[in-house]
Image (cartoon, rainbow, N blue to C red):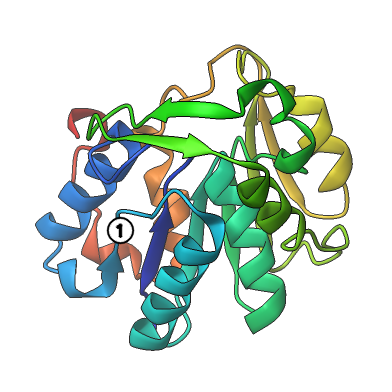
Amino acid sequence: MSGSILYIHGFNSAPESKKATQLMSLMQRMGLSDQLRVPALHHHPREAIAQLQAAISELGSPLLVGSSLGGYYATYLAEQHGLNALLVNPAVSPHRMFDGYLGTQTNLYSGESWELTLDHVEALAELEVQAPQDPQRYQVWLQTGDETLDYRHAEKYYAACALRIQGGGDHSYQGFAEQLPALLSFAGIAAHQYKTIDFAAL
């Protein structure tokens, strides 16, 4: 489906996160809700990837928009399917960072508790791909003030892609709503469909 978008949330996040709700609100205002999927992802990578594969099948050739761990998933799926991807403060090699996180986790939105195990980490490692080399297919939005991930890892890994690096900000990506016209354009949605929308008010 041309102009469709699959939003992929991050670790212990949910469709209720701020970026996801801003995007859902925007697509609803344009009458394009049926072209957006924001699945509540299972905490296990294999389950999450199965959910995302199903959403891609539904949408056809969506723009993958991945935040944090969702950016890692989006990169794997974009390489597998030849899709475009917009990554927001994406995680790079997250399986290498989870040593200190094994054990009980709590989803920030649902309150669900679950156990992060070595099997989760191994499943994440299975999704690692070579650094993408296509600036036409990848936009990578980074903020240097990201307190969770060192933006320089993504800057290096995605060096061959179209990078947008802003000073300051944080891991949630401050000012996301104001950048949404660029996201819509990348998704192939015509400008006349959103020219009257006040993005700052989302």
Viewer-nearest residue: 13 or 197: 13
**Residue 133 appears left or right of 64:** right
**Element type at marker 1?**
loop
Which quadrant would residue 45 be assigned to in this image?
Answer: bottom right
Find residue 5 and report its horizontal and vertical position in percent.
38, 67
Find residue 31 and report its horizontal and vertical position in percent.
11, 67
Find residue 3 and report its horizontal and vertical position in percent.
37, 75
Relative to 121, is 188 above or below? below
The C terminus, quarter of image: top left
Q: Residue at x 44, y 28 (%)?
A: 105
Q: Residue at x 23, y 65 (%)?
A: 193
**Residue 88 appears left or right of 56:** right
- The amino acid on which the numbered mark 1 sits, given as a three-letter code, is Val
**Residue 88 appears left or right of 165:** left
Residue at the disc numbered 1: 38
The N terminus, quarter of image: bottom left
Q: Residue at x 31, y 60 (%)?
A: 39
Q: Residue at x 59, y 58 (%)?
A: 73
